[in-house]
Structures are given as structure tokens and as C-alpha cells.
Image (tube, rainbow, N blue to C red):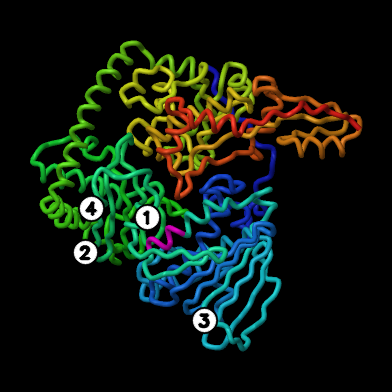
Amino acid sequence: MEEDIITPINSDYGDDSIVHLEDMVHIRLRPGMYIGKLGDGSSHDDGIYVLIKEVIDNAIDEFTSGYGKRINVKIDFGERRVSIRDFGRGIPLGKMIDAVSKLNTGAKYDSKVFQKSVGLNGVGTKAVNALSSYFKVMAVRDGKCRIAEFSEGNLTNDSGIIDSNEENGTLVEFIPDQTLFGNYHFVNEYVERRVWNYAYLNRGLTLYYNDKRYYSKNGLLDLLEHNMDGDGLYPLVHIKEEDFECAFTHVNGQSSDYYYSFVNGQHTTEGGTHQSAFREGFARVVREFYKKDYEPSDIRQGLVCALCVRIQEPVFEAQTKTKLGSTHLAPNNADGTNDSPFLKTYVLDILKRHLDNYLHIHSETADALLAKITQNEKERKEIAGIKKEAKAANKKASLNNRKLRDCHIHYNSNNARRLETTIFITEGDSASGSITKSRDVATQAVFSLRGKPKNTYNISKVEVYKNEELNLLHNALDIDDGMDGLRYNNVVIATDADVDGMHIRLLLLTFFLRFYPDLIRTGHVYILQTPLFRVRNKQKTHYCYTDEERIEAIHNTPNAEITRFKGLGEISPDEFKNFIGKDMRLDPVLLHKDFDTKGVLSFYMGENTLERREFIMDNLRVEDDESIVVA
């Protein structure tokens, strides 16, 4: 039997192959190690927002240490310049330049100085510096200050220590490097959401974002009141003790439990040990209160919870700190032992005391919770029967063979490219065929719709499972049991930019908002922008997404040929590569803080009403076809 032979790479491997990279150079070469992913700002977890977070985290650490009750955040959207000013102690002037330009340098290693800090690895501000085309830091301490400027992590100006009349604290200004982040843009809603979270988690702190004031009096109670869609089934329950705080209620129409979870002010979007401790403890206390062995999923379905713990030197599973890995309230001792309480035990003890007492005192809440658990139990059993029938009909095979062209990497894996994972939900075989042929099979999947999906505004979850199209869709996303199983970071609706395509978008958004609102709340849903026109001559090709872009392209392209794309199916696979690669244009689907989900869905997707007919007639525009004139 012939052995497999690996052909050697034709290159010399010697002393010259061993290269040492300076700190700033290494960050620029491997940014994903420090900020997760780059992105262009369309996604809430893109790198430009991580840069903002890293600087604000340092300001928050000053506040929690008892210094400075105000933080100013400004973004100049035109210049893309970010400015963050705190009024804490200010970075020690003699070490200021080292603190922002040398890895493994900082005060966060001294737990006596920063007790329950988010930043522990001496990386954050250095990454901001290295990944910015312009970076400025000013530290003010007791009438003295120092100002330094950098470009791509390299020092360009140092004022030295000089006199100052400024208040104590630190100012950081930066412009993310366009050579790394591309033609990026800041989405105001993403920044505002982060600023609000800092306010909710730090009572007594006032933040100003572009001169608007952000302040919270009641912490996580305010967070839930401001972010919930509609009313809870019982009044919000608020528990606070030492380093633990939570607020929660149940809602109808939600497939699983949903958490706004935080550690030391860091938004742990992927949860972790603190969230697992709460989920387990909540179900256990409720079981013991009702003295009945309910399924934990029946207890938690529909639960909406804001949760925060503060622990010493937390261990996260990545530099971006989206998932907590710590099992104790404090780090291990030098000998590897740990005499601090288990996080799980700590959370359970608090819930046993507070939640059990609350349910005994507030009988109306106890009755409402019991009714919800009973309803969940009944619904689960009905759905189990439908799933059994679906399995017998071999619908899973139908999903794999007819509907879903999967990718190799998934969001719920540990692969380094997991944040790039994307599923395109397309209409018809032509569009799905073109995207399938041009996609990156490692990270991009395609789900093909057969016609328009069912309007889910007035149907139950049981009916969703009976509908083949919708059943296959949520199985493809793997969100039946909650967001933990989500297979793709980006869920992209890719439909034609015509009336039918817009209608399909609305039907899909209605489905997600009714049964999986977490998918939209956590910033996973997007609309794919595809070009309306192609303007080209023998020298160049322009893809135009608006009439304005078309007119400009015609003006700059002599003897141009203009093509109007009437649908995604008309775009060839070779051309599709230009629209679903690294420069892919995505419009994020955002839920504003005051968005009335129930009211909007009722108006647009409910039964036809006189009011909606009048609205359509009042807003109907008839435009003449515009002739295309070629210069």
C-alpha cells in the first residue's frame, strides 16, 4: 500500500526564520487575539466598540475604587474620533507612556489598588493605541499633567510633565486605523446601549455621551424596565446583597430564558459560571417552594433577568471577556487551594434567602409564576408530540438535503473564526444557488425559503412546530432551547429589494420578534444590502446601492453600460463574491429602547384595519420611471 507523502515547503528554515515582534507590532499583526474581530461597525461586537469599551472600563475601575463620579464620552462621527475623559486619580505621570504602550504593564496586577476590576491583563489601552491611526493620552494629577500622542502605537509627541489647571483624571482620544478596520462606521445605538449599561451597573455614576446625560437610580431594575417588551407577568423582583444583584420577571411568547448578565460591569454576552449558577439556583428554589419536581426548562421559559456579580480577579475565557470562567469569588491561593466561597454556592444561598421569602410574602406573584410554569409544561408536552411525528417523517433529512447548505465552523464552537459565522436566509433556488456557489464554505451557510413564510403574529408556538418551513428554520439556527445553541453569529436576511422581498423580511422579523426576540436583542440579525445597479466600461466596474451612487458612477464612467438588478437570482456567483466577502454591507436590525414591539407588530402584521389602509394610502408614492442617460 502506497504511503501518503507530504511535499516539503520549498523554503529555508533557519535562524532568520525566528522573529521577535515588538508589543505594538504584534497587536497590529494579530488583532483578533486582543479584540476578537475587526469588522466595520455593523455588528455590536465589532472591534471598534471593543476599543471604546477598553478605555471606559479603565474609567469605571476608577469610579468603583472611589474616584470620580463623572465620565464624558464623545464621538465625532465625521472624523471617527472617540474621546473619553474620566475624573479619577489620573495615570501616574512617570509611567504614563509605559501604561499605554507596553504589554504586561499596569496597576491592575496590584489587587490592593484595584479590588474588583474588569481589566486584569494589562492589555486594553495598549490594544487601542496599537490599532489607532491617532492616539492621545493626557493624565492630570494634582496640578501636573502629561500629554502623549501616538500613531499605530508609535510615540510621536511627549509633552513631559507640565503644570495644569485641569481636574484630576485621564483623557484618551483615538481614531481607529482605517487600514485595519476598512471603511468602518460607528452605530450610535450600539454605543448608547453600552453607555446605558455602565449607568445601570454603577449607581451614583453620571455619564455624558455626546452631551446627553445617562444616570440610573435603581440599577438593574431600571435596566429591565427600560428594555423589556411589554409588561411582565408579575411585578419585577429585585434582589441585592453585597456583590450580587438581580432583577427578573416572566413574559409570555418567549421560547427560553434570557439574561442581561454582567461581571464587575463587563457585559458577559455569552454568560458563564455566574449565569449557570443563577439558572440552576433559580430552578432549585422554585421547585422547593412549590414542593414539586418541575422540569427546569418549564420553570425558566419566559424568564427575563438582569444579573450582576462582582468578584476579585475574574477569569474570562477570552480577552474580549464575554464569558466568565471563574468558579470562586476570589482567585486561587499561591499553593493552588481556594478558601473563598464557590460562586455557585454563593448565588444559591442568596436566592434561597431572598427568593423563597419573596414568594411567601407576595402570593400574587407566586400564583402568576405557578400559572406560567403550568402553561410551559403543557406546551412542552404538546411540542414533544409534534417533534416525535416530525422525526418519524424524517424532516431532519429534509432540512439537511433540501433547505440548509451548512458551513464547517459554528458560532457555538471554540474555533477562532466563530464570530464570522453567517447564515443567509434566501428566497428561491436561484438566489440561494448563487450565494451557495460563491460563499466561504468554512463560515457561511445558506438556508433557502420556499415562497413566503407564514405570518406568525397570531399563532402559538405549537403551530410554529406544525409549520414545516418555520420548523426547519429554527432547527437550522438551533435556537429551540435558547441562545446557547445558536449555530451562526450573523443571521442575514437576503431577499430581493422589491415588494415581495420586503414582505418576506417583515414575515421573518415577525417570527423572530414573536418567538425568538433574544436573537434580535443580542444583535445577531441583519439585512443584506445588494446592489441595485452595475455601471461599467472596459476599464472599471461600479456596483451601486442607491440612485445617488448610480448617478455618480455614470458621471465618472465614460461610455458606461448600466444594468439594473431586478433580483438576487440575476447576480452571478462570481459577482456575489463581491457582496458577501469582507466588504459585505449589512444593515443591523436594532430594537430601540422605546420600541413598542407589540404595537408595531399589531399594526403591520395583525388583521387588516381601516387605520392601516389609511396609513398606506396616505404614504403611497407613485414615481415616474427615470430614464438612464449615459454620458
Residue at coordinates 39% horizontally, 54% vertically from top-left?
316
Circle 1: element type = helix
Q: Which residue is mark 1?
A: 223
Q: Along the horizontal axis of the image, is 40 left or right of 595?
A: right
Q: Nearer the viewer, mark 3 or mark 1?
A: 1
Magenta range is 196-201
The image quadrant that residue 472 belongs to is top left
Question: CA–CA distance between discs 4 and 2?
Answer: 14 Å
State whether residue 315 is above or below residue 369. Answer: below
What residue sits right under mark 2 in the picture? 339
Amino acid type, residue under disc 3 in the picture: Asn
- 411 drawn magenta: no
Q: Earlier in the sequence, mark 1 or mark 2?
A: 1
Residue 22 seen in the current view: no
Give the residue at mark 3. 168
Question: Can you identify the residue that label 4 sits on?
Answer: 344
Q: Which label's residue is closer to the chain start, 2 or 3?
A: 3
Amino acid residing under circle 1:
Leu
**Residue 260 x, y percent position in the rendering:** 36, 50
- On whether residue 197 falls in the magenta region, the answer is yes
Q: Quadrant of the C terminus?
A: top right
Residue at 44 percent across and 24 percent down: it is 455
Q: Earlier in the sequence, mark 4 or mark 1?
A: 1
State the separation of the CA atoms marked 4 and 1. 24 Å
